[in-house]
Amino acid sequence: MPEWITSRALVGRARELGELRVFLDGVAKDGGCLLLVGEAGVGKTSLLAVAADHAAAAGMRVLRASGVEFEAEVGFAGLHQVVAPLAAELAALPAPSRQAISVAVGLAEGAAPDRLALTNALLTLLSEAAGRDALLVVVDDLQWLDHASAVLLGTLARRLAGSRIGLLGVVRTGEGGVFEDAGLPEVTVGPLAAADATALLTEAFPELPPRAAQQVIAEAQGNPLALIELPAHTGPGDADPPFGRTPVGRRLQLTFARRIQGLPDRTRAQLLLAALDGSGALFPEIAPADLEPAEHARLIHIHPLTRSIRFRHPLTRSAVVELSTQEERRDVHRQLADRHPADSERRAWHLAEAASAPDEHIAQLLEEAALRTKRRGDPVGAIGLLLRAAELSPGPDAHHRRAMFATYLGADVTGDLTDPRALVARLPGQGHTVTTAVAAAAYMVNSGGDIDTIHRLLLGALRNAARPIAAWDAPLSEIVYVMQANCAFGSRADLVGDYRAALDRIGLAPPGILDLLGNTFLEPALRAGPSLAALDEAIAGIGEQADHAHAVRLGIAALYVDRLTGCRTALWRVVEHGRAGGAIASAIKAFALLGFDGVLSGDWDAVLELADEGLAFTTRHHYRLLGGFLEYAQAMVAAARGDRETVRRLADGLVAWAAPNSVGFVLQLAAHAKAVDALSHGEFESAYRHAAEICAPDIVPTHKPAALWVLLDLVEAAVRAGRSAEARTHADDIRNSGVAEISPRLAMVAAAVEGMTAPDPSFREAFDAALATPRADRWPFAQARIRLAYAERLRRAKAQSEARHHLANALDTFERLGAAPWAARARTELRATGTPSAHPAPGPATALTPQEREIAELAATGLTNKQIAARLYLSPRTVSSHLYHVFPKLGVTSRAALRDALAHSPLSPD
């Protein structure tokens, strides 16, 4: 690779440029993917441009695409941008690959390509385009890419190793979508440091008075775009910041809005046309002179050769649209519709945006476009078109038919769950829109569909249902129930915020079980407390509950607050009913709940049997999401038992489908299994990182209830990784969160992490409190781990007899559970207390002390002195000293020989 381009060096971005350099070097050798993630205006696009220039200078072929906010509903629009320059290479592909891509982008008719087949075809096309050189695909604003293209590129990103093809994308934080928290490699682009911000402003505006410069720096908060754009609105006489506490992104948009308002009407009209079109094309009837004022105002850039229009920043495009009137936008959409063929989805979409009242002709065009979109392999986009067609249908029959078809299509997207006609037919007339949307959302939720698509669908349904109501009716209750589930599975604060805002607009407290679910299932760490008495009362009466769906919902409400024990009998009844061919959907949910319960309660062999049977149901009936929950149960048992291969297979499988669909909860389950697996194998830093993925941004995040299952793992990993300060902070946060009041298990965990992080001798009181938890043996694996941690502290405090007592109990539990790595650790600790080995093998070597043997056994596994020191609460120097004495005692000269030598070494008395 040539020297890094410096002619366009960016102030304060040495770290990011260095990471891009490493990435591109890697692409040239082995391919790969990297995302630039940050807030609006922070300089992601500038970094993207520098990287693209460097790649081109290095001989790579560069393909460019960009998500457009106002085109996100047009299926495979992003893919079309990527493949448009590759017509010659596309024509040379084998027929199956050529057909798959051509059908997807609308160049040919045919059956919808399978997602895997389409991914393979795209990879083949890019490989052909790369030829002997590497190829880089750069995509700006991935968060606005249409869903079909985003999922395709997300899948492709995970298959680039060994290809010499790179995908470099930009993601704006806080916008959601496929690529946010997708588990792909990322570089976070943050604000500039104060010195760099000053340097950039001085370079751009050397004549700016000091007082004005300080005002701009304070306003910009390190945002490079703000540093460049705000000075135009900061005069020397300004005493106060012009926008007060307005967020930087909004400030910039207001800045652009001021410039737009000062433009001639003709220029503003052409800008709106360009903003809503999204293609960047300069239409023949547009005189360049009409756009010159916008270019002079630094709002757009017109390419001198291609004469294409590029907005200098997405916020500029947004400001143009925001300043227009509804009628102006409709008029532009009518103009844009006329530019597309009669049978194109874009024409139908623009006509729909131009409509101000129901219109059967437009509804028919949308329906036809939906069918074509479905055939091209984008059923999610087809659902959106069909629901819009239903909204524009003037007659109830057409409205019902199109809405019901959207429901059918939802089932097709997410699996053949059940016949949706029964759901729709039960509600007459005006209930169709709401009911159909809820049914489609329910099917997508259960099968692991895209969280954000489902969320938008439900918000639309709530808007349709928004009216003054005196009481909750069935359709409204079902909307809220499905929305609760979707928010929980998305596990994002913005989703929960939308849910709470929707409840506020309804103005009535949710009834019964919905209120419990909203408090104990959706946000248990924040809201469970006041609802626990009502939940306990409802569970006490669950035996009288004949409604299987209601029994399952009570089980869901009990999940995170550790009350599933009281629901077991009822849930097994639901399973039996499903086995007999009855309430199958409820039975599958009961399987999942019993799996979660079994992981915590230690009935692991039964969990594996239950998971196998439940997965057969989920596979047969296409309940992908619930199948993922059962796979998590399998992975957790495998992790505790040391079966790394199974853990990786299951966890990677969960991530592969959950990441593209933004199912944050499933990603957390995968991370939890990986954390326990790493703990089992003594990889404590890795365990900490996986646990911290879940317990962020707060240790007990209110929108991530799965964190309540991970608290012990997080603190134990931190302690064993030598992260003492973090461990202490986490323990304090857990105590201050009040989660100990939710259940005895959480009280036991809260006390245990206090013991793990407390100084000598106060750790005893905390550990004793944890083990004194009433019926702590209901959670045997957690209890045994707490005993092991306690014993390790006791042994180091020279309380050998007490340590042996807890170690013996822990070892018994680990062996009963089949948790082999943990049993081995307990045995090692027992030997270190002086307890004789079960099978001593005397030999000629000099006997080792218990601590020498413990250190030698850890060294024999490949751990470094530093890692051994962190695990045993020793200094690396002490470990080194012990090994210095161990080697001659065993007659060896290297760590590689330790394992065999230890097998014949006696243990000295305590």
Image (cartoon, grey):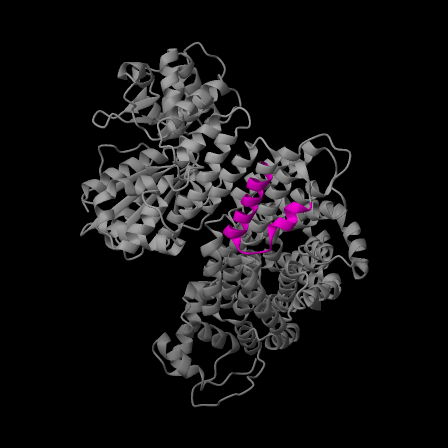
Quarter of the image that includes the C terminus = bottom right
- Please state the horizontal and vertical placement of residue 129, each as a whole percent of the image: 22, 48
The quadrant holding residue 477 is top right
Q: Which residues are magenta?
A: 399-426
Q: Viewed as shown, does residue 218 lie left or right of 827?
A: left
- Please state the horizontal and vertical placement of residue 418, each as a whole percent of the image: 60, 55
Residue 377 among those drawn in magenta:
no
- The reply to whether residue 696 is in sight is yes
The quadrant holding residue 56 is top left
Q: How many marks?
A: 0
In terms of depth relative to the viewer, which is nearer, 313 or 890? Answer: 313
- Please state the horizontal and vertical placement of residue 749, each as a whole percent of the image: 65, 59
* Above or below 30: residue 220: above
Q: Viewed as shown, does residue 78 lie left or right of 668?
A: left
> What secondary structure characterizes most of the magenta part?
helix
- Please state the horizontal and vertical placement of residue 120, each as a whole percent of the image: 33, 55
Residue 402 among those drawn in magenta:
yes
* Above or below 372: residue 244: above
In terms of depth relative to the viewer, which is nearer, 405 or 121? Answer: 405
In terms of depth relative to the viewer, which is nearer, 157 or 842? Answer: 157
- The reply to whether residue 215 is in sight is no
**Residue depicted at 27% across the width and 14% down the height:** 289
Q: Viewed as shown, does residue 806 lie left or right of 685?
A: right
The quadrant holding residue 896 is bottom left
